[in-house]
Amino acid sequence: MRASPLGRLAFAVYLLLVVYGSLYPFTGWRDRGLSPFAFVVAPVPRFVTAFDVAANLIGYLPFGFLCVLALHPRLQGGRALGVAALGGALLSLCMETLQTYLPTRFASNLDVLCNLGGTLAGGALAVRLAPWLLGTGPLHRMRSALFQPGLAADLGLVLLGLWLFTQLDPTTLLFGAGDLRNLLAGPGGALHAPELFVSVEALTSAANLVAVALLLSLIASPASRLRVVFLALVLLAMAVKTAAFAILMRAENVLAWLTPGAWQGLVIGTLAALAALALPRAARVVLAALLLMAATVLVNLAPPNPYLAANLTLWQQGHFLNFNGLTRLVSSTWPFAALGYLTWVAARRAALG
């Protein structure tokens, strides 16, 4: 079995996400007069919730899983699992040590143990599934059948995976990534009539959706049923969005994201994307870049969403505060990463003639 560049890329990206999520919101750093390693020998915290334990276990499960896949085939089996466990333990110790200097975080030896448990669980699962994922199993065959081989396709798949991740942010428009106000100054501006926002949201959602479809077309195999793959991706994104609202809000608000502007943009964007997939490759690259830039400008100039604002009053971030900071980061920066990717693809194509 060959090494998986996609697995290594995914592991690198997830490692960065873990670091950001562990140290968010990166403000208020100060020395509390304690040893940064005091938590190692401190008593186990008395007040621990099931949510805290589950979050620390689940958060490091993909780390262990992707680490084992990234090591394959150089290291396999128990050796790969051991390296993954050591990496997870060291990463968790480093993050907990740094959290000692953050007033909004609490360093805990129990968190380290839970993180290690999640790493081991994920790593053990990857050891079991590595032949199925990286060998000749059905997932590997699907990857080969649907997408082109090579680094460009692997990077594109990572970008599409991150795009799905952005749907977990309940504060954004549907497919409306690139809102820098979340990172720089926060939302602002006067309220406007809902009719204005419906138009802005529809245009933003449609433009982003067409851009994603065109990006997908650049990495799809010529033999794949591209339009079917695109529709499946849209349905998956909608499922992720619905699941995020189901977890963060009450059951009756799981479809609160489907505002009038969102469903109009969804319909218009889907139809436009199905038509745009017939364009020549060079035109698809240029159009995807233009739509990403236009949608990013729109989402940053958009007035406050009257529908989303009303529904978010029901949302108590609580335990999800740090996770929400992570989803906002990915959502805000995704279009710029996609633009960089499109530029690289175009330059690479030109260099190859």
Image (cartoon, rainbow, N blue to C red):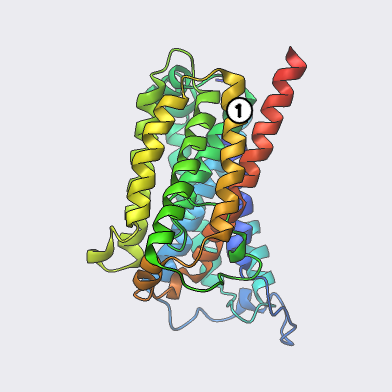
Is 200 left, or right, of 240 in this rendering? Answer: right
The quarter of the picture where the C terminus appears is: top right
Report the front residue among 4 and 243: 243
Residue 133 sits in quarter: top left
Image position of 59 with respect to 321: above or below = above
Residue 243 position in % (x across, y down)? 33, 55
Residue at the bottom extreme, as displayed: 33
Which residue is drawn at the image coordinates 47% and 26% (left, top)? Answer: 276
Mark 1 sits on what residue?
Answer: 285
Residue at the left extreme, as displayed: 252
Instruction: Name the amino acid type tagged 1.
Output: Val
Which residue is drawn at the image coordinates 37% and 39% (left, top)? Answer: 268
Image position of 170 with respect to 76: above or below = below
Residue 320 position in % (x across, y down)? 45, 68
Q: How many marks?
A: 1
Report the front residue among 241 and 128: 241
Q: Is residue 200 visible?
A: yes
Residue 67 sits in quarter: top right
Residue 214 position in % (x across, y down)? 51, 30
Residue 186 position in % (x across, y down)? 59, 70
Q: For mark 1, does the 10 Å Cα neighbourhood hold few (<14), some (14 to 19), or many (20 or more) residues? A: many
Q: Is residue 73 visible?
A: no
Residue at the right extreme, as displayed: 351
Image position of 120 with respect to 147: above or below = below
Which residue is drawn at the image coordinates 69% and 80% (left, top)? Answer: 28
SS of the residue under disc 1? helix
Residue 70 sits in quarter: top right
Report the front residue among 8 and 47: 8
Which residue is drawn at the image coordinates 74% and 87% (left, top)? Answer: 33
Report the front residue among 339 and 71: 339
The quarter of the picture where the N terminus appears is: top right
